[in-house]
Amino acid sequence: MNGNTVLDIQGLSGGYSLNRPVLHDVSFQVNPGEMVGLIGLNGAGKSTTMKHILGLMTPQKGEIRVRGKKRDEDSETYHGSLAFVPESPLLYDDMTVREHLEFTARAYNVPRGDYEERADRLSRIFRMQDKMDSLSTQLSKGMRQKVMIMCAFVARPSLYIIDEPFLGLDPLGIRSLLDFMVELKEGGSSILLSSHILSTIENYCDRFVVLHQGSIIAQGTLEAIEAQAGTTGAGLEDMFYTLVQGRD
Amino acid sequence: MDLMKLRAERRSRFWGKEVLPYLGYVLQSGVAALMLFALIVFSAWYTSLVQHIPAGLPIRWIMLVLFVPLTVNSSFRTYLAPADTVFLLPQESRMKSYFQGSWTSGVVYKLLGLALIFLISWPIYVRSDGQPKPFWLFLLVLIALKLLASYGCWKELRMVSRRAAFAYRVLRYVVLALCVAAWIWQPAGRSLIFIVLLAATYTAALRLPAKHPVAWERLIAQEKVHSGRVLMVLGWFVNVPGREQRVYARKWLSWAGNNIPWKPEAAYRYLLMKSFVRSDILGIVLRVGILAAFLAWWQRGSNVGIGIYWFFVFLAGIQLSSLLRFHSESFWLHVYPIAPGSRRRNAIKLAFQIQLTFAAVTWLPLLGAGLERMGTVLMALLGGIVLCLLSRFFASRKKTEDDEDDE
């Protein structure tokens, strides 16, 4: 393990029942300034992996460290080091967009001045200026997803866990998100991103982890994945297809 | 598909599986016993009031204040669920049979409640009013007005335009208030003519706005509100799983909570304050506060006023205890770096601060008793503060399932 590793998962097995683990001996790392794509079919274990990282599920075997800390060692530091964007927006019906951002900033101990600056910038990037004082119930699904993304980005932790962020976003929203993720990555933040839109993430992620039926079947850079898939000159989608084909 | 049967099944599932299991705990809880005690005290006070009615009691105003809300308020339980927009939509033309039960139960139970309150208020009315209306005629007029309000409310739910629905809601309040006032103040014959004419005009006006055959989304949202309220009331006595509450925008209160200290330990209090100012609880606390202030001012010269004041401070404490159950299933409270135990500590602190403010504000009318009762009035305030402290003490001692998640 690299001493600077932001996320380190070693030998993770876990699931909803002891007898039937969903994940089998999963190990991978995410380093500073790195964007890692977590890809797999429906039910491959991507969301279960993320739930384990978030501390919503307890590993049956193995361990997860975020910036060298396990969740049970220091829960506040652990959670303060990561932010999550879920697949479906989870917002409080009784709060406005601005209040969601402010609540997040308060919880993550972001100084008030930084919060105001970031909130202002994010609202411009995601074209939400005129919705900042709207209740979340008055927003469209895409806008709700934007609020989730803005909340994660206002916190500025070391690690972002992002699950299917493009669902419901308009093309401009997708572009803004990708640009902002690149900016964060260049600033030293780490991103673990799950998506089925392989053609999009292919050009943005530094490495990929391919999950299939709860196990890692390939991981590494695009070139490494290509070598493991045994393809030449193919895109990520074709590599992925080759890797999972015939494994059921 | 038997739609009447479907509604009946949903109804029995809600009351049988979601409410009934908690009723035993409600009866066992000390709060329920205390409410019973309060009922007995009220009965004794009311009996004494009926026997010694103060001169110049504004009985007509009291009857107006009592019966306008009771006749106007209408609601319907439909037990509709979000998925019905997909699965029941093909049955839209047959939904009348589904809603038949909603209409019947929405009207019958409220009529029984109305009749009960009327029976209770009758002795004081008949003894105080110089020219009381006949008992049966009064009751029949109230029943007719209640039916009119329910009909109006049902039509409002179907209106396409939200603005029209709101305008008709205001109209319903105005029409019913005028009818009740006319009945109380005017001679029976004249007021009956007025009521019939006004009711006919109102009914004709209800035909004008465009209406949905079934206002699915509005009915589903209303159902969520009603079921949430039932569980909220249960939540005063026992811990029930959280349900979504109705949200009121209340832009004029958007500043509330902004001055809460900017630190992670107080982040949850910020969230809770925002939720509180947009919740049903605030509305209830405000209404209870106004009633408490009015009654305390009315009885400011006697110890009954102090008893009323303490009772309402206690009642506010029960209502504010709902804050402890807010966001009990919130995903983000597990993911955000919020200190263990912070949720419960903040909820108790906020509930205490609000109850203390309530105790201070509703105490002010007692000052109207003058300097000669200043000692007693100050003791009343002290008692109010003690009640707030007791609420905080019991809230911090009460173990809930949330604690396990929290700590």
Image (spheres, coloured by chain):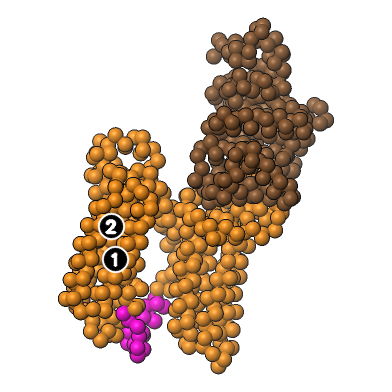
Picture disc at residue B175: 1
How packed mark 1 is, by other alpha carbons closer than 10 Å (few <14, some 14-19, many 20 or more), is many
- Count of marks placed on residues: 2
Residue placed most toward the observer, B30 or A138: A138
* Residue B10 falls in image quadrant: top left
Question: Badges 2 and 1: C-beta atoms under 8 Å apart?
Answer: yes
Q: Position of residue B134 (x, y in %)?
A: 19, 78
Q: Which amino acid does label 2 sit on?
A: Gly
The answer to whether residue B388 is visible is no
Among the chains pictured, the one given orange colouring is: B
Q: Height in image: B293 above or below A66?
A: below
Would you say residue B42 sits in the magenta stretch? yes
Instruction: Please provide percent x and percent y for residue B371.
Output: 57, 91
> Which chain is rendered brown in the image?
A
**Left or right: where B251 falls relative to A185:** left
Q: B237 or B174: which is nearer to us?
A: B174
> Sequence order check: which comes first, mark 2 or mark 1?
2
Residue A164 higher or lower than B123, as above or below: above
Q: Which amino acid does label 1 sit on?
A: Val
Which residue is at the front of the view, B23 or A53? A53
Q: Quadrant of the N terminus of chain B?
A: top left
- Is A231 on the left or on the right of B119, as rendered? right
